[in-house]
Amino acid sequence: MTMQTAGVLKSSPVIRRHEKNPILTAKDVPYESTLVYNAGVAKYHGKYVMVFRNDVWSDEPRKFKYINLGLALSDDGVRWTVQSKPIIDRTFCNDDEVERIYDPRLTVVDGRVVMCFAVDTKHGLRGGIARTDDFEKFEILSLTVPDNRNMVVFPEKIGGVYHRLERPFPVYSRGGKDRFDMWYSDSPDLRYWGNSHLVMGVERFPYANDKIGSGAPPVKTPKGWLTVIHTVDKDESRGKNGWEPAWKKRYCAGIALLDICEPWKVIGYSREPLLAPEASYEVSGGLRNNVIFPGGMILEDSGEVKIYYGSADTVECLASADVGDLIGLCTPA
Ligand code: BMA
């Protein structure tokens, strides 16, 4: 059976890429660095803080060496200063099972930073949650069973509990191929999670035929929780498009609005991409071209929403839109 492909995709007219894109690259990092992308971003103690993924590869022949996470600070959310050393590496969980830690997402909850992260272990891929006040000392609060990742925590308790979106990988029960959806769980203490619900299935999105996953932690608006997600379409006819022999996927960003009190209920979502790969730094010259992977979203007092995204698994970028325009894209579920 041939899979229906998504064809040509364009970004929504409501979103503007920042003229300084890419806003962070390996050149900005004062230690070994090849690829800087998939960052989590938050506003904390009057600064913008970013924890970014730093992949280190050898030069020709290009070969993956290791990953760590770096910290960058900014006064305006556009120009960033990377701190002198990486803050997290594979020893973070103090567990020999762990091979790498990546794709951080940051939420300020109860005045403290909560970081979700993906953990590749020798026995599956886990979703982690840690808490910090200073990006030096972290308390690891929970790690899921495999396979789960793309976890994001909401910035406040609702009905006395914490909330997260997450993306398990149910291969066995979804036909043995990628058909992965967005889920929800809640917790009394950020450690023990339950009350799980399906939020959105991949089949809802006309521009995804493979999987969807949460992007950045949701922001609160009078109309509901606004949340950016990533959507993936696959086309077997695609060949080499990056450093690997073949790259058949395309990652876009979509936008959705969730119920304030019961966030597993979808109020609306975009039937077309919010961001599709189009800019030069999104479609060429990267490890995996045609990848837009949002991980940070900030609602400014002015109504501007900043969306931070990894581009081509190679650099970090910024795009912004008006909050009312983003809500307007979320047509009823
Ligand atoms: C996903 C994750 C991301 C990555 C994306 C595109 O499965 O591994 O870290 O950006 O693929 O390669």
Image: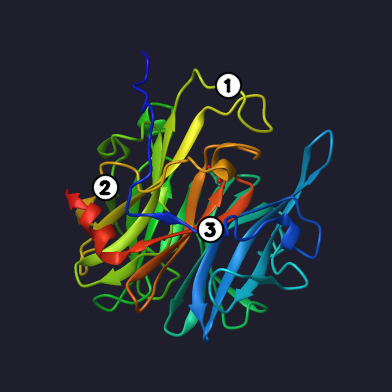
The disc, 1 or 2, on the residue closer to the chain's N-terminal end is: 1
Q: Quadrant of ligand 1?
A: top right
Disc 1 versus disc 3: distance between alpha carbons? Answer: 30 Å
Disc 1 versus disc 2: distance between alpha carbons? Answer: 29 Å
| Nearest to the observer: residue 199 or residue 229 | 229
Secondary structure at badge 3 equals loop
Secondary structure at badge 2 equals loop
Task: Check disc 2 and give the amino acid type.
Answer: Ser
Secondary structure at badge 1 equals loop
| Nearest to the observer: residue 111 or residue 242 | 242
Q: Residue at x 64, y 33 (%)?
A: 242
Where is residue 263 shown, x and y percent of the image?
A: 25, 62
Give the residue pinned by disc 3. Answer: 19
The part of the image, by quadrant, that contains residue 159 is bottom left
Disc 3 versus disc 2: distance between alpha carbons? Answer: 25 Å
Give the residue pinned by disc 2. Answer: 270
Q: Residue at x 66, y 45 (%)?
A: 122
Q: How many numbered marks have been drawn onto this rendered protein structure?
A: 3
Q: Residue at x 22, y 66 (%)?
A: 224
Q: Does residue 86 sit above or below 159 in this rendering?
A: above
Where is residue 13 shown, x and y percent of the image?
A: 33, 49
Q: Is mark 2 within 8 Å of ligand 1?
A: no
The part of the image, by quadrant, that contains residue 80 is bottom right
Where is residue 202 shown, x and y percent of the image?
A: 32, 39
